[in-house]
Image (spheres, rainbow, N blue to C red):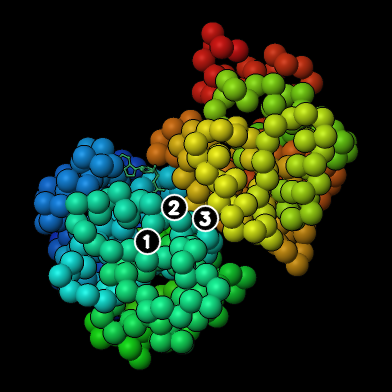
């Protein structure tokens, strides 16, 4: 298929049809053509969805519009919002599986999807959102509170300390946002009644449904809803869907409208990516200390990704020992410490954060401009096999909503080099080598990537 074209399929018949025979509006076709090569499959060929040019035309309540304009300060829908919101909000509220770039505005799509379906005068849980990590739960609660500020819709979450420990209180948020394990426990112990749920969202859906992610719990949640709720819409959103997860997702979420992107569309050209060959781990540490830290006040915020919890602790200790101020986060830390580290980073009190992949997905901090892959993302069981999805999610912590971003891959030894070679081939995107042996080279690279203005460098 030519770059810039649109393929539209009917998910039932799976026949390739022209855009216009499926009643898609011309505006939708033009919009997608300008942006990306998206492959859209509509569940019902008779459905007519028109891409939304404004939030006003979506039939949202006055309170939700006020939230979007006054609180969020959004002016018009982003591309993915223009495309998916009509599909999400139009009765009969079909299921949707949607893929879109990191930082392109997906959260708004499913947050509005849930909020628009809640009857604020009706008690009980009507919307459910499942996220892979505590950090994403907290972030999505924050977005929903702001977007729904004028609606009075109540929100409960698994990250709320009041539900910690042995509290068996009934969960009565009209929307409940949580990680899958805790939500399942609430369902099993009848703390959470799902009989009125009409919209179920899986954020980072490929991770939620992947065998290396939360598939078992997510499937149980889907089964629980099948037994307890009547008519509910499922929304699956992620920046990545590999073929295996795509097949599974389309099976467990049947008759869904679908939007997918081919792999080569995903490699986020806005994020400049580089490879840096090093001779030892000490040299990786030296690069951070001598190049990244001295510039951190000029370039926004940086996340350094490492592969293991021990790696995060070791690198953090090494930086601290030499007086370099940064924080670290990994999944084994206490909740309060995790929350504090994220809050400090969001508030800009810390400029550099060392993280495991607990943070590779979803974190939205618009001032993050630089991502360092201290260790390359590889499959847990087999370090010579790249984890393509994780690579994309990691670098996508920078370059949010069209902002500039850069990613440096620090490569030690043949294995890490081969891993990046495979990532290049997978995304059909060359990652050039740079040597960071003098300050000028590094600063000119950052300037070229748009992270520093020429006067600053
Ligand atoms: P997301 O991909 O949902 O994490 O969104 C990335 C960033 O884009 C967030 O900081 C959002 O607040 C911002 N954003 C989302 N939609 C819009 C919009 N329509 N106009 C302006 N900013 C937006």
Q: Quadrant of residue 111?
A: bottom left
Q: In the picture provided, is 318 more to the left or to the right than 409? A: right
Outermost residue on the top side: it is: 455
Q: In the picture provided, is 156 more to the left or to the right than 445? A: left
Q: Name the residue at 60% across, 45% down.
A: 341
Dots 1, 3 in contact, CB < 8 A: no
Q: In the picture provided, is 66 more to the left or to the right than 359? A: left
Q: Quadrant of residue 226?
A: bottom left
Q: CA distance from mark 1 to mark 3?
A: 22 Å
Q: CA distance from mark 1 to mark 2?
A: 20 Å
- Dot 2: element: helix
- Dot 1: element: strand
Q: Quadrant of the C terminus?
A: top right
In the rendered image of this protein, does residue 337 appear above or below residue 290?
below
Dots 3, 2 in contact, CB < 8 A: yes
Residue picked out by circle 1: 98
Q: Nearer the viewer, residue 6 or 415?
A: 415
Outermost residue on the bottom side: it is: 227
Category of crowding for the residue at label 3, using alpha-carbon neighbours closer than 10 angstroms: few (below 14), some (14–19), many (at least 20): many
Q: In the picture provided, is 456 more to the left or to the right than 293? A: left
In the rendered image of this protein, does residue 100 appear above or below residue 14?
above
Whether residue 16 appears in this view of the structure is no
Category of crowding for the residue at label 2, using alpha-carbon neighbours closer than 10 angstroms: few (below 14), some (14–19), many (at least 20): some
Q: Name the residue at 77% across, 35% down.
A: 320
Q: Position of residue 113 (x, y in %)?
A: 26, 62
Residue picked out by circle 2: 139
Q: CA distance from mark 3 to mark 2?
A: 6 Å
Q: Nearer the viewer, residue 275 or 336?
A: 336
Q: Is mark 1 within 8 Å of ligand 1?
A: no
Residue picked out by circle 3: 135
């Amino acid at each position: 298929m030519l770059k810039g074209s649109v393929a539209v399929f009917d998910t039932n018949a799976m026949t390739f049809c022209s855009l216009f025979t499926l009643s898609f509006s011309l505006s939708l076709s033009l919009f997608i053509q300008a942006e990306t090569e998206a492959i859209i499959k509509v569940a019902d060929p008779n459905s007519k969805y028109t891409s939304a040019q404004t939030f006003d035309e979506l039939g949202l309540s006055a309170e939700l519009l006020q939230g979007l304009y006054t609180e969020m300060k959004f002016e018009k829908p982003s591309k993915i919002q223009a495309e998916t919101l009509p599909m999400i909000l139009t009765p009969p509220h079909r299921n949707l599986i949607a893929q879109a770039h990191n930082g392109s505005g997906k959260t708004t799509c499913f947050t509005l999807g849930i909020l628009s379906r809640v009857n604020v005068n009706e008690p009980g849980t009507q919307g459910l959102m499942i996220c892979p990590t505590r950090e994403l739960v907290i972030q999505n609660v924050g977005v929903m509170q702001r977007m729904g500020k004028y609606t009075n819709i109540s929100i409960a979450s698994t990250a709320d300390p009041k539900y910690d420990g042995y509290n068996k209180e009934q969960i009565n948020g009209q929307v409940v946002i949580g990680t899958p394990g805790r939500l399942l426990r609430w369902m099993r112990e009848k703390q959470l009644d799902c009989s009125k749920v009409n919209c179920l969202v899986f954020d980072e859906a490929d991770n939620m449904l992947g065998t290396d992610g939360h598939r078992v719990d997510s499937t149980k949640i889907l089964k629980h809803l099948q037994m307890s709720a009547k008519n509910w819409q499922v929304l699956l959103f992620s920046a990545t869907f590999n073929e295996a997860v795509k097949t599974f997702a389309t099976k467990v979420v049947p008759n869904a409208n679908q939007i997918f992107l081919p792999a080569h569309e995903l490699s986020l050209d806005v994020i400049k990516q580089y490879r840096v060959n090093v001779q030892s781990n000490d040299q990786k540490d030296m690069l951070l200390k001598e190049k990244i830290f001295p510039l951190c006040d000029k370039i926004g915020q940086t996340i350094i990704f490492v592969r293991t919890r021990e790696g995060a602790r070791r690198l953090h200790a090494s930086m601290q020992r030499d007086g370099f101020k940064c924080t670290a986060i990994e999944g084994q830390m206490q909740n309060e410490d995790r929350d504090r580290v994220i809050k400090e980073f969001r508030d800009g009190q810390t400029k550099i954060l060392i993280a495991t992949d607990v943070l590779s997905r979803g974190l939205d901090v618009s001032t993050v401009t630089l991502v360092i892959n201290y260790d390359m993302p590889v499959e847990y069981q087999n370090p010579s096999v790249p984890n393509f999805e994780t690579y994309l999610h990691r670098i996508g912590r920078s370059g949010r909503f069209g902002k500039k971003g850069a990613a440096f891959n620090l490569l030690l030894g043949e294995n890490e080099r081969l891993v990046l070679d495979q990532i290049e081939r997978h995304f059909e995107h060359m990652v050039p080598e740079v040597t960071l042996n003098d300050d000028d080279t590094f600063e000119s690279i950052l300037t070229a990537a748009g992270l520093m203005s020429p006067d600053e460098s």
